[in-house]
């Protein structure tokens, strides 16, 4: 029976891992995988997480199931982290999921139940796994303009014009902050305008916010989601704790649905749990309990916020240094956008062939669209990276 299967196309991001591991060059650089690394190249565990894990280990007395919705105190913590005081009373319900991908999958199924003929619109470009996670049944995938490679900024006029052509059967995936893969974000004024377009057209906004705190700050990065919570009637939000809590392998996510009123929100919540039952049944609890412990303890909460700021500040500093190095070695301002963008990623504007040359000739690995993980850069390697890009791109 297996002979009827064909080999799937390798994941563009994960396909980089094995060749990089086998590369014998001591000065190789892995800028492809999307995990935070310190200046020694280590993917750290925040100390606040370690302390919370020890508390959990000391106090945990059962490994029984936590229920379809997961850890209730974790769900409340994530609601406060993402929505702050903007959550309309009774209209938003959240449930724990296996990572942000699990949240996207659950909400995609919910979307299919609500609007079986919906068309899902993704930004150009977007995270490659969005299409795979969101393609359900007869749901179509479309693209809306987002990034202008000539200006290396958001083409907001084109984006807004496209969104104004949509209607109630359309669902639009919006990157809450730190756009992946470009790093180019909407301004607060632009978020305000998109919210007004939602009210005019009736399309369903679906936020994916996986990098809260990695951009301009924990509160600042939540502006779009919070403004929409105060403005629109309905929306979906998928959240990940992989980056800001450094809990990648523990798969800690949360799915939120905001309804027009308490009754419709409750029905959506019941459907979300029913969907989870048919996919993975119960979510894992370890990571969710750790997040809950941190958020409920004033001292741990402040320690986590401080550690998150250290990570964010480092990426901002790396962006500034990269932009300055490009200016110094190129004599121009073509790469100034790197210092303006936020989050883990930026696109360098190289062709797939040039990306391959970067790997082959310089031992510098990145995704074929030239997305680099800023956090994967070490200060001592900045000039080497910049010089290699300029040589390959010349």
Image: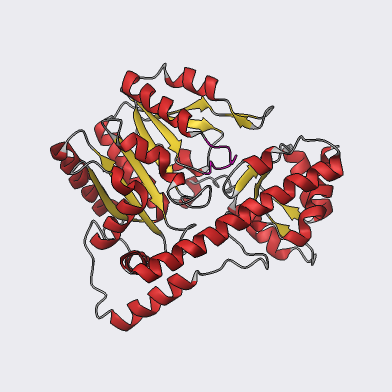
In the image, 359 versus 235, the foreground residue is 235
**In the shown orientation, is residue 265 left or right of residue 221?**
left
Which x, y percent locates residue 187? Answer: 51, 33
What secondary structure is the stretch in magenta mostly built from?
loop
Answer whether residue 1 is magenta in the image: no
User: In the rendering, at what x and y percent does residue 383 appear?
Assistant: 81, 53
Going by the image, does 256 lie left or right of 20? Answer: left
Q: Is residue 182 magenta?
A: yes
| Most distant residue in the bottom direction | 58
User: Is 99 placed above or below 328 here?
Assistant: below
Q: Quadrant of the C terminus?
A: top right
Query: Quadrant of residue 195 in the image?
Result: top left
Measuring from the top left, give residue 129's x and y in whole percent. 50, 44
- Which residue sits at x=67%, y=43%? 339
**What residue is at 24 percent from the left and 78 percent from the top?**
62
Q: Residue at x 66, y 53 (%)?
A: 317
The reply to whether residue 136 is in sight is no
Q: Can see residue 322?
A: yes
Coloration of the structure image: secondary structure
Q: Which residues are magenta?
A: 178-185
In the image: residue 154, left or right of residue 332: left
Query: Which one is in front, 140 or 98?
Result: 98
Q: Residue at x 84, y 52 (%)?
A: 361
Question: From the viewer's perspective, is residue 258 above or below residue 124?
Answer: below
Q: Quadrant of residue 71?
A: bottom left
Picture coordinates of residue 19, whole percent (x, y): 70, 59
Tag count: 0
């Amino acid at each position: 029976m297996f002979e009827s299967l064909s080999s799937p196309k390798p994941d563009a991001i994960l396909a980089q891992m094995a060749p990089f591991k086998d590369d014998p060059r001591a000065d190789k650089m892995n800028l492809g995988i999307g995990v935070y690394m310190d200046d020694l190249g280590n993917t750290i565990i925040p100390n606040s997480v370690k302390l919370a894990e020890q508390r959990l280990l000391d106090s945990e007395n059962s490994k029984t199931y936590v229920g379809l919705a997961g850890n209730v105190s974790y769900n409340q913590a994530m609601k406060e982290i993402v929505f702050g005081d903007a959550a309309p009373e009774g209209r938003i319900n959240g449930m724990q999921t296996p990572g942000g991908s699990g949240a996207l999958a659950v909400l995609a199924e919910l979307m299919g139940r609500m609007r079986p003929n919906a068309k899902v619109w993704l930004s150009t470009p977007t995270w490659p796994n969005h299409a795979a996670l969101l393609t359900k049944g007869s749901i179509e995938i479309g693209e809306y303009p987002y990034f202008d490679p000539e200006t290396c900024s958001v083409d907001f006029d084109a984006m807004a014009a496209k969104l104004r052509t949509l209607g109630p059967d359309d669902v639009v995936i919006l990157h809450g902050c730190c756009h992946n893969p470009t790093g180019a974000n909407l301004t607060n004024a632009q978020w305000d305008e998109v919210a007004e377009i939602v009210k005019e057209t009736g399309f369903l906004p679906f936020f994916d916010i996986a990098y809260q705190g990695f951009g301009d700050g924990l509160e600042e990065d939540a502006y779009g989601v919070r403004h929409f919570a105060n403005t629109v009637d309905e929306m979906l939000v998928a959240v990940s704790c992989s980056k800001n809590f450094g809990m990648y392998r523990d798969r800690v996510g949360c799915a939120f649905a905001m309804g027009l009123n308490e009754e419709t929100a409750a029905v959506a919540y019941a459907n979300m749990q029913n969907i989870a039952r048919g996919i993975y049944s119960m979510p894992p609890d370890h990571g969710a309990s750790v997040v809950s412990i941190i958020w409920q303890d004033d001292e741990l909460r402040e320690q986590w916020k401080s550690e998150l700021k250290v990570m964010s500040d480092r990426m901002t500093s790396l962006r500034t240094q990269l932009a300055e190095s490009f200016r110094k070695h190129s004599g121009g301002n073509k790469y100034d956008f790197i210092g303006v963008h936020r989050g883990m990623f930026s696109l360098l504007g190289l062709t797939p062939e040039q990306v391959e040359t970067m790997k082959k000739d310089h031992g510098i690995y990145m995704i074929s669209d030239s997305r680099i993980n800023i956090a994967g850069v070490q200060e001592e390697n900045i000039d080497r990276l910049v010089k290699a890009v300029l040589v390959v791109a010349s």
